[in-house]
Image (cartoon, helix red, strand yellow):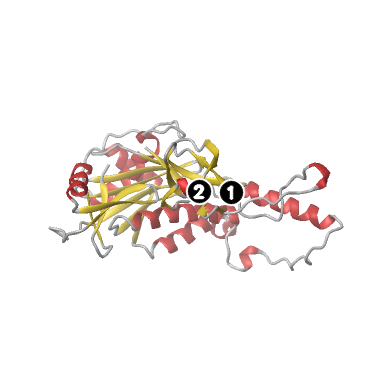
Amino acid sequence: MFVPVIDKENKLLMPTKPSRARRWIKSGKATPFWKKGIFCVRLNIEPSDRCIEPIAVGIDPGSKKEAFTVKSESHTYLNIQTDAVTWVKDAVKTRREMRRTRRGRNTPCRKPRCFVPRNAKGGLAPSTKARWQWKLRICWWLKKIFPITDFVVEDIAAVTKKGKRRWNKLFSPLEVGKKWFYSELEKLGTVYTLKGYETKELRDGYGLRKSSKKLAETFDAHCVDSWVLANWHVGNHILPDNKEMLFVVPLQLHRRQLHALQPAKGGVRRPYGGTRSEGFKRGSYIKHPKYGICYVGGTSKGRISLHSLLDGKRLCQNAKPQECKHLTYASFRTRR
């Protein structure tokens, strides 16, 4: 897996091999740092070459898993398989139910706002916006560490309903969401779209196969399509030259709520949620003397909980904040 490089003025350069990055760091020519789960280096000297090749990102959207490939004509720099954001619909439903029950109790509350349909305001449904915002966040993240110029997206289409043209064009969440995504993605670079059948034709032309196991953590599950899309634009390869993958899982951060959903003994509801833990943002990557590199979870009685980057399991609940060295902030966890 290649290492992103920036110069002393934080300008993006072409990525380099890990062996060369290690030599730079050992000789003092470069300084290592983390950028939300990806190891990068900053050159302390003037680079020998500032030539930048066109770099494209292939994007394969999905309902459960998604894939991104960063590729130039020379190399495949990064393959990413991510989990989609799927919990927002249930969270909004729970919030609505709790608000209704709270208004039914004999407690002070604000007067309900006048209902205005979301489509009248030109907005997106929360679950739809969260799904497409997640893809956009990944693109923003990659744009900050690679000199990306183009994006190639597989243009997925909603299931149409016969005789209902307004539904197919205006009211399908998938169609509305991807239209918003394309408009935002154009602010980062040139956007190209290919239909699903065109992606399949390209994949068959290279002699590549896509696995039927959509939840498998293999290159053939989703990254094969993102690689084909990126290679369609920059070309030069017949077979994938790099099948290493980075797995990215979004964190479900619980925002600060008025109280927990269920009362404790005596009918008292404790405060719940938040995004700060003893000075650390939740989700921050830290280095602990015992548990190594992990990320920050909740807090209690002046201590913080630490979680594993591999599976998200809690490692401890009593870590001292002064023993944790902050590396970078991220709203997702990564593993290889």
Q: Measuring from the top left, give residue 223's x and y in whole percent.
A: 36, 40
For this orientation, the residue located farthest to the left is: 48
Q: Which residue is drawn at 16% across and 59% down?
A: 47
Badge number at residue 302: 1
- Residue 12 drawn at (x, y percent): 26, 59
Q: Is residue 42 visible?
A: yes
Q: Which residue is drawn at 52% across and 50% down?
A: 282
CA distance for labels 2 and 1: 8 Å
Q: Is 254 or 290 nearer to us in this picture? A: 290
Identify which residue is drawn at 54% across, 56% down.
129
Residue under label 2: 321
Q: Can I make out residue 83 in this image?
A: no
Q: What residue type is labelled 2?
A: Pro
User: Is residue 248 toward the left or the right of residue 172 in the image?
Assistant: left
Q: Is mark 2 on a helix, strand or loop?
A: helix
Locate residue 203: give its quadrant: top left
